[in-house]
Each structure stands twice: as structure tokens, then as C-alpha cells.
Image (cartoon, rainbow, N blue to C red):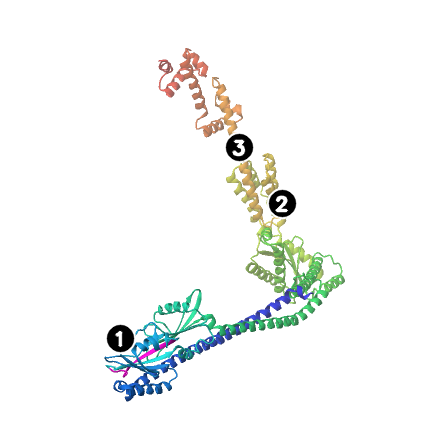
Amino acid sequence: MNMIRSQRFYNFLFSYIVLVVVLLVAVSSVVYQNFFNTLRKEVEHTTVGALGQFRDAVDLRMNEMNRLASQLSYNPVLTPYMASDGGYGSLQAVSELKQYLSTNLFIEDVVLSFNGSGTKQLYAASGTYKLDLFFNSIYHYRNWSPSEFMQTAVTLSAPLMRGVEPVLFNRLEERRYATYMVPIPLNAEVPYGVALFLIREQALTDLAQGVLTESNGFLFILNERNEIIFSQSQGESPESGKRLLERINDIPNRSPYSELSMDGRKYSVLTHSSSNRQWSYVAVLPTDQWMRKVNEKRGIFSMTIAAVFLIGVAIAFGFSVQHYRPLKRLAGIVSSEARSEPLVRSGDEIDYISRAVGLMASEKQSLQHQLRNQGRTLREQVLLTLLKGKLSTKAEMNDILQFSNIQLDKPHYAVMIVLIDDYNRFRQDNSEKMQEVLKYSLMKVVEELALESGAGYGAELMDGRTIAFLVNLNEGFDDTDVLRELAVKAKAFFRQYFRLTVTVGIGGIYDDLSSVPQSFVEASHAARYRFVKGGDQVFLFAEIVPRPSGEYVYPVERIDRLVKAIKQGNMSQVEPAVREAFGHIVETDVSPEAAECICFDIVNNMMKTLIELEIEIDDDLGETMQQLFVPRFETIEELERLIVSICRNVCRYVEAKKESKNIELLENIKVYVAQQYSDQTIDLESIANRFGVSPSYATRFFKDHTGCPLMKYIDSIRMDQAKKLLKTTDLPLKDIMNEVGYVDSTNFIRKFKKAEGITPIQYRNIARN
């Protein structure tokens, strides 16, 4: 089989790839989480550390300038008195300031200003200057005038840093300075002067070199009012820095690390606060560039994972091929040896092998089943041959018994017949296969129970409802009670576990194998007593006492009553008559043969009655009549129930037919009376003779159907006709009497007055008026 078309190979490959992916995901997730978190923290600590170093360096320089201011205040040469004492004092002050400046490369120039009246003189390391000259020519601040300086100097009580700003130096060169002003003496309640330290922007830039070395961004030093003291940008526009600073100042309770977005770009904000002043050192870095190192490592890591995955797939492919080859060879062997169908293109070798093995197991099971069935069939045929006496010599018996593996080595033999009760229901409730299983189980149970007293072998007879057992009894067990106990145990077992009832017939016990057919006939005869006695019983042939034929009394009178009840359609008498006829059979304890004869005669008489009544048999009744074949019934009760059902249908038919005839008779009588009421000789007897019934039946029949006696009905018709003639004609009363059938006028007048309350003449007068 081609490996490319094999579903099993791809199952192997997919399983190994899934294993590689699971392991790779598990390991890479742990490594990724730990490694990149560590790397990220390292990058953060590096930048934060650089910002902290910048803060510490600036704070150190600020502290140095504070100490320098203190030293200036303690130097006697630099007192207001000495510095302002003529030219020599000024020169000494400048010389001292130069010495201080030479020890600090961070400061560009140091300037002293003393508070007081008079012309303002400034002393610097670069020389002495008038106030206006200093601010207008030497260090010209664009946004700081001499008057503003003087105002600040007089009111200054604590160090003050002016942010980096442009200053025109010597009217030639524009420089950027940050100016640090310290009152002298420092921390005095009333300072007498101010020390100015001019710091080049480049000096601060040199200190900030380590902060923005690997990323674009901004660096800010903010005072306590969030005003910029120093700012530096790299790779970003100053306008963006101003906007970012506004966003940063709007952040309440700013933490050391925060993030913000502007123009769709994320920025990381790092903040350090000064330890001895309310300054903030803020670094704003684009997050993507700041974490560039992390992203680069992440890309390398992803490529490494992809490479490891490809290597894992290659290894998985190798393992799949290694595991698939033995399976392929096995499938080839099975394909060449087994008779199963070939695999389709997308077939699975394991499924193929499973189906092939299953087919072989099924074939093996089928062969075993066939062998068992053939063995059982052979054994049953041998048993039936023995039971029916078809083997004439003992040698034939021994040969066929040895061939069928039936061992009849015990000294006594008997036959037991088992009939399944209510066999029709048994067939309806169970499929054919289940019927076979139940019958086989029944045989095995009896054979197992027979082992207690010897051995037993069962065979199913042709009718399907009968199983015959040949019981081979041990020495000392030749007693009918042993067979009865065996039958009772089998019956109880069937009822409890199979919910079946059976009838058992037991033949005689013989010592010769050639007498087995005789025992079979006896058992069959005993089992036939189920027809008379009912099912779920055990009948022993030895206990059957034959009665002389002369003792049987044929139930002639009971059958005659049944026939009469059917002819009359009297349903209330039919059922008792049927039960009496069949009850006679049970009461007289007749043999099954005699019972069948009596039942046949009952059925025959019932059929003749139906023919005499000319009953039309419909499909339902015809189908029921076809069942009236006596040998088909297991018990008399079953036949009795069917005959009662048929008789009920017949009675309903007879009753309906009688009702139809009664309606016809009533209409005929009414028509006859309407035609003959004027006949003076008409009476009850003449009408009865006319319709072939007795006078009493005629008057009773007419009254039952109309509620009125027949003669009274005739009088009512005559009176109606007389009233009609009285109203419409002038005939004399005598003529009217003759017209309606009356002879005696007194009788007519009396009946008319009784019916109408007045005489005929009065009726005519009232009707005409």
C-alpha cells in the first residue's frame, strides 16, 4: 500500500506533530515568559539606572555649588567691604573667584553680587563689571533684565535655578546657559549678596549622555513648578516634546513608570525625583524603540522556535515511517492470505487488519455453529428414528448410536413428551430465532436435570410445538416418580425463567431399547389428555385408567338445546347451552379420542344449523369458521371460547333477521286492515289466518310494536272514516255504519260517543255549523 495514501501513516505523523507542538508550546511558553520578562526588566533597569545616575550627577553638582557658595561667604577677601575697597580689593576678589572656578569644570563662570545702595558692581571670575555692562554686553539674557535681576537678588532666600536659555556672550556669540543663584550666606535670614553660577548647556548634556544613547526620546529636568530647567531630545521634534510634557504634567500622582499615547504612538515615561530638592528628572521614550532590544530578542526566539518546530516535524516524519513500515508489512500479509476486500485509497491498515481478523473469526464461528447444528440435527434424526421404531436390529441401533455420539448405556428407558402451551401466542411473542433459542434452552434444561437419574436426549418433532426426550435411567431409578419429579422441576424452571408453561406426557419405563417406540406412543397418548384436562400438567400413561366405551353418555339433549337456542337467536340461552355441552365432556372424564368425537359432533350440528338458517357467511365469520378444526385446539376451553364467539355472531344475525321480518309483518297487517276495515266479517282470527300466525300472537305482536291492540286499531280506522262521512256527506247514519263495517247501530253509537264524547248526529251538526 502506498504510504502517501495511507490514513494510518498520517495518523502517526499527526500524533507525533501534535506531541512536538505540545512540548514546544509548553517549553517555549515557560522560557518566553521568564526570559523576556527578565530581559524587559533588565532594559527597564538599565534606562532607569541611567536616569538615576543623571539625577545623582546633577544633584551632586548642585550640592557642590551650594558648598562653593558657602565657601565664598566665608572667604574674607570676598566680603562686600574687601571687594569694594578700591581696585586692589576687586583684583583680589576676581583672583579668588578664578581659583574657585578652576576647581569646578561644571561651571562656566561664577559671579558675586552684593546687596546695597549705590552703583551696582558685579565680581566674576572673568572680571568686575557694572550691572548694566554685565547684562547688556558680557552676558546678555534675552528674558532677564538688570532690574529683574536686582529684584530677584534682594528677595532671594533660597537657591534658584533658571532654566537653560539663550545668552549673547560678549555681543558676539550666542550661548545657552542655566543660571543657578544662591543667597550668601546660604540659609541666612538676611543674605548680604547672591552668588551666580553660569552653567553651559553642554555640561548638562554631557551628564545626560547615558540616558538617550540607544533610543530616541526626550529628557527633562523640571523644577517644583514643572518648569523646564533642562531638556534634551534625540530623533524627535521639540514640538512633540512640548506636547508630551503637557500630557505628562496632566497626569495626577505620576508614578516612577507610566505610559501614554500621542498621535497613535505609545510612549514610556520614567520619572525620578531629586533627593534634596523638588526637582523631577523625566525621560520620555517611544515604547517600541525603547524595547527594541527586547523585540530583537523576541524575533530571534521566534525564529529559533520555528527552526525547532521544523526539526521536530522532520523527526516526527522519521518516527512515523519507522512505525508505519511493520504495520504495512502486516497488512500486506493479511491482504495476501485473507479473503477480505482490498482497502480503498484512503484506507486504514489497522481497520483493514481488524476487519480481516473479524471476518476470519466470523467464518470460524460460523463453521463451529454449522458443525454444532449438523451434530444436533444428526442426533435429533437418530432419536426420531429410535422413537418411531425405524431401526429393526440391535446392530443397526448400536452403529447409529455410536455414530451420533449418543450413549445409552443405562439399563432403563422411557420417553417424555413436552408440549408448549398456548403455542400460537408463543409464536406471536417471539421471533423465529428466539423460538429456536427457547426450544434449545428447554432441551438443554431437561437434559441437565436428567443427569441426576441417568441421561436424557431431546429432539424437536415436526409440528414444532412438541419436544420428545429419551430418558436413559440408572439402575434403581426405574420408578415413574423419578420421571414425575424430573417433569415437575422442568415445568417450574420454564415458568420461572422463561415464563412458559408446558404439558408433559410420560410413557412407560422399559428395560429393552427396542421398546422405546412403545413408550413414545404411550407418552404421546398421555400428553393428549391436555385437550380434556387443560395445560400446565404432568400426565403419566401408567396412571391413565381406560373406561369401557359403554359408559360414555352422548349429550344429545344438551346439543339439541344448543341448536334450538341458535335457531331462535336467543343469545342468553346459547352461551349456557355451549358450556353445558362441553362441560359434559369434562364431567364424564372421557378419553381424548371420545372428547374429540363429541366436539366434532357439536361443531357439525352447529354448521348444519347455520346452513338451515341460510345465514350468509361474511369474511370475518368465514375466517373464524375455518378455525373449527378440532385437532388444532390444545384444550376444550379454547374450542369452547371460539364456538361461543361464533354463536354470538349467529344469534345477532338471527335476531336482526327476525326484526326485519317483524317490520315486514307489521306493515302487511296495517295495509290489510286499511283495505278490509269496511268488511263486517273481519276479526282477529281471520287476520291471524291470513298471515299464518295464531290470534294471540297476532294481537300481542301488534300491541308490542304499536302500543295498541289490533281490534282497537281497526275501530280507530272505522271511526276516522265515519267522522269523515258525517262531515262531508248527507248519508243516513245506517248507510255510514255499513260503509265503515258496523252492523249494530247501538254498538256503533256507543263506541262513537265513547271516542268523541257526543253522538254521531251531534257531531254532524257541530261540524256543519
Tell me the number on the disc at residue 629.
Answer: 2
- Lower sequence index among marks 3 and 1: 1
The prevailing secondary structure element of the residues shown in magenta is: strand
Task: Please state which of residues 101 and 667 is positioned toward the viewer in this rendering.
Answer: 101
Q: Which residues are magenta?
A: 174-188
Residue flagged by tag 1: what amino acid is it? Gln
Task: Please state which of residues 641 and 331 is positioned toward the viewer in this rendering.
Answer: 331
Residue flagged by tag 3: what amino acid is it? Lys
- Is 121 on the left or on the right of 200, as rendered? left
Q: State the SS at label 3.
A: helix
Residue picked out by circle 3: 658
Residue picked out by circle 1: 151
Q: Looking at this rendering, what residue extends furthest in the bottom direction?
A: 76
Quick check: 763 above or below 691?
above
Q: Alpha-carbon neighbours of circle 1 within 10 Å: few (<14), some, or many (≥20)?
A: few
Q: Nearer the viewer, mark 1 or mark 2?
A: 1
- Lower sequence index among marks 1 and 2: 1
